[in-house]
Image (cartoon, helix red, strand yellow):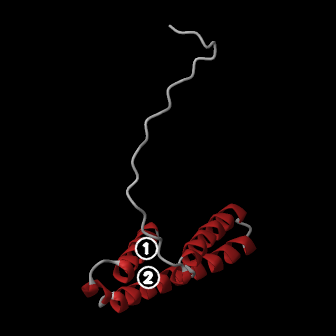
Amino acid sequence: MHDRIAELAGLRAELATCKNGPRETWRDKTDEVQAQIDRVRGELDEAAEALETQSTTLADGGQDVRAAEAAVEARRIRAVLAEGEDDGARAPLPKRGKRTAQAAKAPENASGGGS
């Protein structure tokens, strides 16, 4: 399951690059990447449903610990799926200028005397 979650994260990053990247040719691949995201999301959704069913079955059989583990994994998958639902509404970050480090201020002498 971890590999599917990692694949989804990578595809989301690739989609962001396609939409916001500097090259026009990348924008042509947006539909292909979105299709792959939909495929992986479907697989994760099926896995979450199977874990939820397994959790219910285990709980009915008195195996509370294993049921809880399956329920936690299902919730984790659902949370990952929910992360990407509002990504389309999010605007790209504004461009920022170059930031340089500033030197630290010299400590002030509280006694007012010289050295």
The numbered disc on residue 4 is: 1
Name the residue: 56% across, 73% down: 77
Q: Which residue is mark 2?
A: 40
Q: Is residue 23 above or below residue 115?
A: below
Q: Residue at x 37, y 56 (%)?
A: 98
Answer whether labels 2 and 1 touch (C-beta < 8 Å): yes
- Name the outermost residue toward the top: 115
Q: Which label is found at residue 45?
A: none
| Residue type pointed to by label 1 | Arg
Choose between 42 and 106: the one closer to the eye.
Answer: 106
How many residues crowd mark 2 within 10 Å: few (<14), some (14–19), many (20+)? some
Q: Amino acid at mark 2?
A: Val
- Please provide percent x and percent y for residue 58: 68, 72
Q: Is residue 109 left or right of residue 41?
A: right
Kindly report the distance in space between the C-alpha atoms of the residues bearing marks 2 and 1: 7 Å
- Circle 1 packing at 10 Å, graded few (<14), some (14-19), many (20+), is some
